Image (cartoon, grey):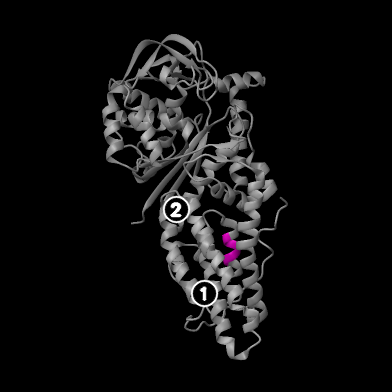
Amino acid sequence: MRDRFYITTPIYYVNAEPHLGHAYSTVIADIENRFHRLLGDETFFLTGTDEHGDKILQTAKRQGIDPKTYVDRINSLFRDAWALLDIEPDRSIRTTDPDHIATVQRVLQEIYDKGDIVFKEYEGLYCFGCERFYTERELVDGKCPDHGIPPVRLKEKNYFFLMSRYQDWLVDHIKRHPSFITPEHYRNEVLSFLKEPLDDLCISRPSTRLTWGIPLPFDHRFVTYVWFDALINYLTGIGFPDGPNFSKFWPVAEHVIAKDILKPHCVYWPTMLRALGLEPYRHIHVHGYWQIQAQKMSKSLGNVIRPGDLVEAFGVDATRYCLVREMTFGLDARFSEESFRLRINADLANDLGNLVSRILTMVYKYLGGKVPVPGDLDGPERDLRKAVVRLVPHWREAMEAFEIHRALQGVWEVINMANKLIDASAPWVLARDPNKAGQLRDVLYSLLDALRIFSILIAPVMPTSARKMQEALGIDPEKGLNFEAARHWGLLVPGTKISKIPPMFPRVKV
């Protein structure tokens, strides 16, 4: 049976348009989904938008439109952004979708019937920007850590999920499953937070204060707290409770999130699942912030970069590549347009693009544009062959660990080795000596087959470029772009007609 892989992004709050932070999370998930498809796994990729809550209602009012019209418009912007970035989800869910509303109400009713939701009065510090209560220890100098403003003391009666019942279980689960939260420093952060007694979670808002939400099935005077609503999308998207995709994919669920939503995903969500009688997700992968001038990129701060602007400036594949090379997964990174331009010129134009152009041009010039018959490959090309063969399992290991930057670093080390082989073997000199025709064929065959394998290894990150490389090598990408083909050296068929292609990555001005 094929292995299975289920990957999700956060569902993005539609109080503002998509920006670079959203794009990074979604590109990472798309890359990992494409990687698992290369392995031959059966995959499902879910993204979407979070469309309820007070901030949505207030934003719509400021624009003079009803909330449904507003969320429809922002949702379409997210879908357009993913299409621009060549992102291919299996479903883009919306929390206003009828099946999601039904799922949320079913989950609420089940947990309520179990006795894990109770009605009580609560007084606490509430941030309207985050739409949640904070404890004193979570504040920074008495202010919300995300919005930098003091929360408001609020007292009201609401329904609460008895999350504290599951604290000991959660701590034990995290300790017994070291890869439950990755990278490790975020796992340690959650365990540190759980050293303090866990409060119960307020999961409702009075409809006298908020109407734009999912009504509680057991008390229509209240709507569901936006986080309790939003997290359940990961179940809805694959057909909870009895859809065929649910039984197939929930046991292998993996989430990608940014560190600002660590607590809801690593504390609220697993305890909700436990109360529901479900096993938690398999892994959650947490990345850092994009910063501009040492500040977090944030829609509330207004210092955002739009994905469409990057694609317009650099192209789709180059943008995807720069996103995952400029940020080490799990750490913060500073966005710089100049660093993107330097990366494109160095890695893509000079290294990969130049390599492709040089090899195809020489095969046309010296071998009539056909894949040659190789000999014993025992000349200077043997080191390239050995390096490529060693690279493939290390690339897979890094990709499985969500260390995409490390996987690409390994690929580029061997790409540079291929460029050096051209300089050292000098095919233009070999071509002038009839006694060295065999050596010329061996060198160029090795370079062509290295290109074939490079095309497979870059495919999850730069799918269009990978297909162009395969087609130039006379390979049908539908057959050639798979991991099994990358594991074997020498699959290029001698006599296959190759084709030259325009420069893949034109240099950009710095």
Residue 362 at what x, y percent from top left?
Answer: 65, 76
Where is residue 429? Give x, y as percent: 64, 82
Task: Determine which of the numbered discs, if any, sits on residue 338 in the image.
Answer: none
Q: Earlier in the sequence, mark 1 or mark 2?
A: 2
Magenta stretch holds residue 363: no
- The secondary structure making up most of the magenta span is helix
| Amino acid type at image mark 2 | Met
**Numbered disc 2: secondary structure:** helix
Q: Which residue is mark 1?
A: 492
Placement of 457 over or under 188, stated as above or below: below
Looking at the rendering, the stretch of residues picked out in magenta corresponds to 466-470
Residue drawn at (35%, 38%), measured in percent from left and top? 242
Q: Which mark is residue 399?
A: 2
Residue 418 versus residue 149 in the image, above or below: below
Q: Quadrant of residue 271?
A: top left
Q: Quadrant of the N terminus?
A: bottom left
Question: Toward the viewer: 46 or 35?
Answer: 35
As for residue 469 lying within the magenta part, the answer is yes
Which marked residue is nearer to the observer: mark 1 or mark 2? 2
